Amino acid sequence: MKLTFKIFAVFLIFLAIGCGEKEEKEKIKLTEQPEQRKETVEEAVTTTAEADAMDNKGIGPVKSVELGDIDAAMATKGADLFKNMCSACHKMDKKFIGPALADVTERRSPEWIMNMILNPEQMIKEDPIAKKLLVESNMAVMANQGLSEEEARAILEYFRQYDTEN
Amino acid sequence: MKKISSFLSITLLSLLMISCGEDDTKTKQSKTGGAMASNAAERVYVAPGEHDEFYAFISGGYSGNLTVYGLPSGRMLKEIPVFSQFPTSGYGYSEETKPMLNTSFGFVPWGDSHHPDISQTNGETDGRWVFINENNTPRIARISLETFETEEIIEVPHSAGNHSSSFVTENTEYVVAGTRFSVPYPQEDVAIENMKGNFKGPLTFIAVDDEGHMKIDFQLKMPGFNYDLSHPGRGDSHGWFFFTTYNTEEAHTLQEVNASQNDKDFIAAVNWKKIQEYVANGGGEEIDAEYAHNVYDHETHTATSTMMNKVLTVDPRDVEGAVYFMPTPKSPHGCDVDPSGEYIVGNGKLSTDLTVHSFSKMLKAIENKEFDGEAYGIPILNFESTLAGTVKEGGLGPLHTEFDGQGNAYTTFFISSEVVKWKLGTWEVLDRQPSYYSVGHLMIPGGNSRKPEGKYLISMNKITKDRYLPTGPELEHSAQLYDISGDKMELLLDFPTHGEPHYAAGISADKVKANSRKIYRLDENKHEYAALSEDDTKMVRNGNEVHIYMTTVRSHFSPDNLEGIKVGDKVYFHVTNLEQDFDVPHGFAMIGANTSELLIMPGQTKTVTWEPKKEGVWPFYCTDFCSALHQEMQGYVRVSGKNSNVPLKWTLDGE
């Protein structure tokens, strides 16, 4: 009778050790995972920087944009549209939901900017820069705000004016 | 040995054959169904991503709503809230939509929707609006087929049991309301046993303008019968409306027996053009009435309720030639007019036959004064004089008839549970198909118009029993889809419906889908409390009321941290969805709110109230999975004590 008790106790101890070991293993796994994720993000960032951005016109209805002197009236209209349709996610001077937009006209071609506004669903799926930006923006998708080509052009004019003046 | 074995094998074989034969007969029906099933499946199959050919708007009965189905697939596409609160979207809970359910009895949170009808132009369905009546607290609603939302509800005063409704004339000049439970007119405190001769059954003609807005033009003070169903004249009979009646006995108790004593009741033929003219020339008497007229505006995203206090009443005896009664056997239910407008079908529900009246014969009988007495001063036309024919032994308990535009009619027989096809003019029965079970009404797209699209028919059945997997004692009603393009009807599909469909209206999808709205434009949003950009968001205190102007966009609220709310406050969350893309709604749910969630379409503003009862920090969140960051779409409200001095503060990301 006593013997059986002893055997039973030994069993219990084994069981307890077993459980403890398992827990430790799980903890190790948990700390490993986030590190792996970081690596992929970093990779993505490097690729974005490497892309020759100003040559990329993006994917969408806008094939070429002719830029002249800045049209102040158009820029004012663009600023108003930007406030109502874009500012919930974009600030000029800081990264918010999406990237900060100061100097965007120096980083991206005018066609790319307009296509990103007009055709964001396809851009984030197929355009190499937009794809990387989506990852960098924590998978927050660019919303299609249903703007016309003329309205997107006005917003581009606002960006040009902003980049000239700041 | 050989003999024995061969005898045995023959016996065995014959036994097998017998059992096979038996099997065959027993399952013949299901085997035929089985063999046809693959073919039937192809004919109702709408491949992934493809669209149905027809919209079907099916009454939700005691759900108070209207459901939208695609045909031939039988897929439910939407439930449109009409007469009942609908927490899914906040309809009837949000500040903007509560006025839609206002009545002369105050806020009524539920209704019994019955008969949808699509607006018509030149006698054809035009895809602008669907009208539907409420039976319990008499009302008619108009639903836009651009937004698929209820835009207007008008209460019908002096009525009770608004059943013979909401059918439209062939240019949507009028939508009609009736009275199935005749009542004192106007209401007064009298002994119920004084009903006979004293109660009335008003029929109400509601004018519809080009924008769809409804206004009661006149109310016809009819004898106190039960006005059951109705349909408009069309073609030559345009300008007339026909209403079935029962309980011409005017029984007020045990109607099951006492309302079925007369061999014939009436179809009331109303020459509304004549009364319209009479009224336009100053006829009728304005009397007191109390009824609500509720209108939803898509620019302010807000409904208003206006109490009306007068209605124009017309005594039918004062307008010569305006109203006649056509005797019709056995408590007729459906009152259906064929596409030409010549035949008026009385579906005598306690009979085996259908009585068909002729419009041209009716006009002649009126001209020749072929009367057979009168009821309360209204001439009764001689039965034989208006009779076009009788469909003999169609089945048991005919309820409702529609038409295919090819000279055929289709009638539901409730008691014998079948759909029967018969020929207009010869009145011969051509085909019959069982319906599972106890079919009430049926619908052919455009079947109540000059141009039916006679490809499919759906029967709406009252009893479901074993048609689907059992779901406890309560079952959704079943519907059946038949192909009616051939000589014989073919049953293709069973599908469940929601609530209790009392009728449906169908229309070719091509007439509707191009007009279906995708978003509400932000630059057209005129809501009093809208925040049209994050710059406009704020909190405003007005006594113990706090108004929060809030916005949503994938995937955050602005503001998302709110402080300065106190126990005992009444908080109004005015939430504007800044999205301008198709099918990107956001939801709003507040812990402990005694209201409902909000589901806010792109460009829309909706308001829900919350009366915090406990101090603490309370979260709110988006209920509609909007993006990969949907789970992050939440915020906090800090609730302080009644006498605290925490100032109002609203921020997003600390700004």
Image: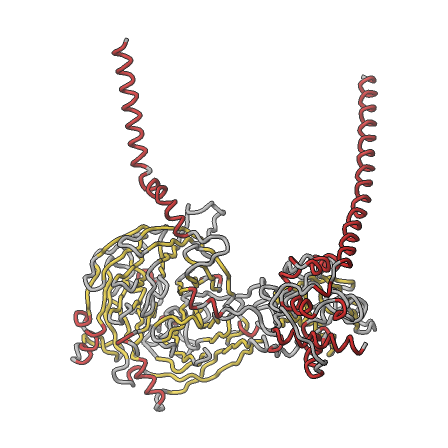
Total number of numbered discs in the rendering = 0
Closer to the camera in the image, B613 or B235: B235
Image x and y of residue B58, in percent: 43, 62
Q: Nearer the viewer, residue B299 or B253?
A: B299
Left or right of B184, for residue A99 = right
Q: Which quadrant is home to the C terminus of chain B?
A: bottom right
Residue displayed at 31% across by 71% down:
B243
Residue B8 x, y percent position in the rendering: 29, 16
Tell me the residue at 83%/30% (across/down).
Answer: A17
- Please indicate whether residue B444 sits to the left or right of residue B477 in the image: left
The residue furthest bottom is: B282
**What residue do we see at 32% from left, 52% from top?**
B417
Residue A52 vs residue B119: left or right?
right
A134 with respect to B517 (left or right): right
Q: Relative to B277, say whether B502 is above or below.
A: above
Report if residue B566 is visible in the image: no
Q: Image quarter for residue B279?
A: bottom left
Q: Position of residue B174 (x, y in %)?
A: 38, 78
Closer to the camera in the image, A128 or B609? A128
Determine which quarter of the picture holds residue A138: bottom right
Q: Is residue B39 above or below residue A20?
A: below
Q: Residue furthest top?
A: B1
Instruction: From the top left corner, tell me how far across and down residue A165 is, in percent.
Output: 80, 78
